[in-house]
Amino acid sequence: MNTMIDQEVQARQWTLSPLNRCDSCAAEALVQVTGISGDLMFCGHHYNKIMDSAEGYKKMMSFALTVLDEREKLVKD
């Protein structure tokens, strides 16, 4: 049985595609961070790793103008 959240995720139009790759590894990028000097792409693992570190979080917040977070794609049907 699908929940309301699952149905919303399934109906959502995603911006990032499987062709977008993490800048740190070859995994599919699920997060795009745009800063003044360009874009950074992250898989869920590498984005979490940076954001879970106090120093990484501080650096990301000083760089980021916008964050496109599509980690909801990982929600199971």
Image: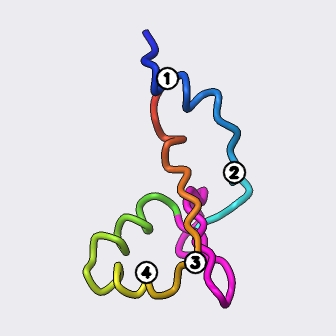
| Residue underneath mark 3 | 65
Which span of residues is magenta-colored? 24-42
Q: CA distance from mark 4 to mark 3?
A: 8 Å
Locate residue 76 relative to residue 30 in the image: left or right: left
Percent across and percent down for residue 74 are 48, 40
Name the residue beneath numbered marker 1.
Answer: 77
Amino acid, disc 1:
Asp
* Residue type highlighted by circle 4: Met
Crowding at dot 1, Cα within 10 Å, few <14 / some 14-19 / many 20+, comes out as few
Q: Residues within 10 Å of mark 3 (few under 14, many from 20)?
A: few
Q: In the rendered image, which residue does mark 4 sit on?
A: 61
Amino acid, disc 3:
Leu
Q: Is residue 59 magenta?
A: no
Residue 29 location (% of width, % of height): 59, 60
Determine the image quadrant of residue 58: bottom left
Q: Which residue is mark 2?
A: 18
- What distance separates the C-alpha of mark 3 from that of mark 2? 23 Å
Q: Residue furthest top?
A: 1
x, y percent for residue 18:
69, 51
Residue displayed at 48% across by 25% down = 6
Q: How far apart are labels 2 and 1 at the CA level?
A: 18 Å
